[in-house]
């Protein structure tokens, strides 16, 4: 049973490995971007986007 709406989407998906790979890439990219920003609001925005 999924604990989040995104988890439910993954559960019903036919291509789970692709979704996991895309999520991993999104998180990795967001963290690479975060280290280059000193503005707190830019960091918060990047983290919010990575959780979509």
Image (cartoon, rainbow, N blue to C red):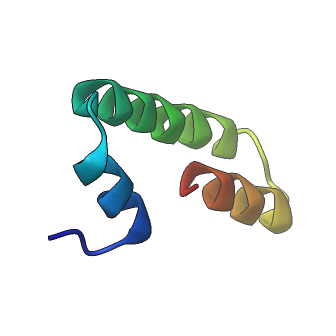
* Residue 8 quadrant: bottom left
Viewer-closest of 16 and 12? 12
Q: Residue visible at 66% across and 46% down? A: 34
From this view, report whether residue 6 is shown above or below residue 29. below
From this view, report whether residue 3 is shown above or below residue 8. below
Q: In which quarter of the image is the N terminus?
A: bottom left
Task: State left or right for residue 49 relative to residue 31.
Answer: right
Q: Extreme left residue here?
A: 1
In the image, residue 7 lies at what x, y percent? 31, 60
* Residue 21 quadrant: top left
Task: State left or right for residue 24 relative to residue 30.
Answer: left
* Residue 14 quadrant: top left
Viewer-closest of 33 and 38? 33
Task: State left or right for residue 31 relative to residue 17.
Answer: right
In the image, residue 38 lies at what x, y percent? 80, 54
Q: Residue visible at 54% across and 57% down? A: 51
Number of on-image labels: 0
Q: Residue visible at 65% across and 62% down? A: 48
In the image, residue 52 lies at what x, y percent? 58, 55
In the image, residue 2 lies at what x, y percent? 23, 69
From this view, report whether residue 49 is shown above or below residue 30. below
């Amino acid at each position: 049973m999924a604990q989040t709406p995104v988890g439910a989407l993954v559960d019903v998906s036919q291509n789970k490995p692709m979704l996991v790979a895309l999520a991993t890439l999104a998180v990795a990219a967001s963290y690479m971007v975060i280290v280059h920003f000193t503005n707190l609001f830019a960091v918060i925005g990047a983290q919010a986007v990575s959780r979509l």
